[in-house]
Amino acid sequence: MKLTFISDTHSLHAQLPPLGSGDVLVHCGDFTGRGNLVDTMDFAGFIAAQDFTHKIVIAGNHDRCFEDERRLEAEACLHDHGIIYLNDSGVVLEGLKFWGSPIQPAFFDWAFNRERGADIRRHWALIPAGTEVLITHGPPWERLDRCTHGARVGCEELLTVVERIRPRIHAFGHIHEDYGVLEREGTVFVNACSLNEQYQVVNGPISLEIARALPVRLRPC
């Protein structure tokens, strides 16, 4: 299967380079600027038009309408466009087990904030063993989580669960400055942020090929 990952497009999806085609397109959250429903509808139409068999989306801290009183309307917008929306939930596609969560360590007063420690740990405890493709908005600790000023801001509690479950791919965004791919102990970590820290579209989609019982292979975009 060919999986393509993007993230943190912040309503600038129309400026993205061509995404190509494949089996699964995944957006790792922050597809709007401030969680506007009109922006959500425009994004849903864009994703629906892409040449992929399946489309998976999770929300991010900017996508407020997926956590407040507009939640049902926002989720219905994605569903009506044939997009799979994951929120501490999973889906099996062609035998491959995906799990997605928008939660990240508390960051100002944005959406889906949870305090480090027990508060966020209860979300990661929901990730089932056997998850093969894990999608979270924020990164785990020391995995493509370095900010411009040098600080690591990933989630320690998430890393603990990832090291125990060992998904084949863990995709995320949130930290615009650390876009890229990293492999550790059999897991391919993907920071798929499409925008840099100045909110400019500079990064292309990241595509991987994954097959049953075979290692993940990088695929040129």
Image (cartoon, rainbow, N blue to C red):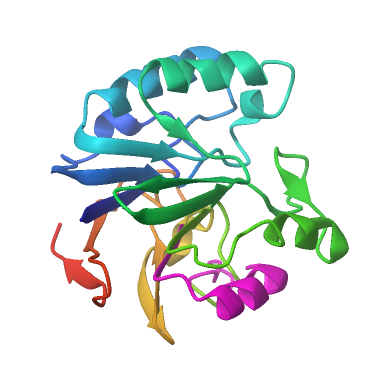
Tell me which residue sits at (60%, 40%) in the image. Answer: 87
Task: From the viewer's side, name the closer residue of 138 and 150.
Answer: 138
Q: Position of residue 63 (x, y in %)?
A: 59, 32
The quarter holding residue 62 reads top right
Q: Is residue 145 magenta?
A: yes
Counting labels gives: 0
Vertical arrangement, residue 218 with respect to residue 49, above or below = below
Q: Is residue 29 visible?
A: yes
- Judged from this view, the residue extending furthest toward the right is 118
The quarter holding residue 157 reads bottom right
Q: Position of residue 159 (x, y in %)?
A: 62, 74
In which quadrant will I find the C terminus? bottom left
Q: Position of residue 202 (x, y in %)?
A: 29, 50
65 to the left or right of 99? right
Tell me which residue sits at (84%, 66%) in the image. Answer: 117
The quarter holding residue 37 reads top right
- Judged from this view, the residue extending furthest toward the front is 95
Residues shaded magenta: 144-171
Q: Position of residue 119 (x, y in %)?
A: 84, 57
In which quadrant will I find the N terminus? bottom left
Q: Is residue 151 visible?
A: no
170 to the left or right of 18? right
